[in-house]
Amino acid sequence: MTMYDCEQDRYTDFATTPSRHSPALRGDLCAIHHGDGARQLTELLAWASERELSASLQQGQLLLQDVDIDQALQINRLFGNGLIISCHLRRHPAVRV
């Protein structure tokens, strides 16, 4: 897969599954509810707990740590209609250009 970095005006290759040559993207995901989506935060917390993800819920904001890109996409698909989801994923080690 290739991702376009608009800040640096360049493309970067990445993988969704780890391998020797291209580690997966991982990072933090933040979810907040809008409207009547508060119940979905609880459902997302249960979903994360089933997958043993590190999670904290404070003041209507749920933070999940060490989420991979496949999990982030699944969370967006399952909960994106009722939650505002922000995710910051990085590849470790960073890509050398």
Image (cartoon, rainbow, N blue to C red):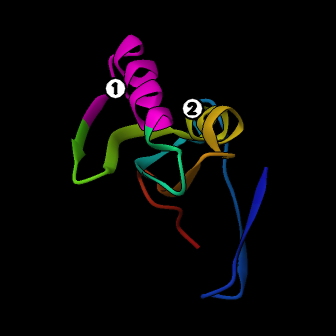
Q: Is residue 64 left or right of residue 20?
A: left
Q: Which residues are magenta?
A: 39-55
Q: Is residue 26 left or right of residue 21?
A: left
Question: Which SS does the magenta portion mostly show?
Answer: helix
| Closer to us: 30 or 91 | 30
Amino acid type indicated by mark 2:
Gln
- Disc 1 to disc 2: CB gap under 8 Å: yes
Q: Is residue 37 left or right of residue 5?
A: left
Residue at 53%, 67% in the rendered image: 96
Residue at 39%, 29% in the rendered image: 42
Q: Is residue 10 magenta?
A: no
Answer with mark 1 or mark 2, whichever residue precedes in sequence: 1
**77 in relation to 14, above or below:** above
Percent position (x, y) of residue 26? 46, 44
Residue at 55%, 31% in the rendered image: 20
Q: Which residue is mark 1?
A: 53
Amino acid type indicated by mark 1:
Leu
**66 in relation to 28, above or below:** above
Quadrant of the image occupied by residue 32: bottom left
| Closer to us: 37 or 92 | 37
Q: Which residue is mark 2?
A: 71
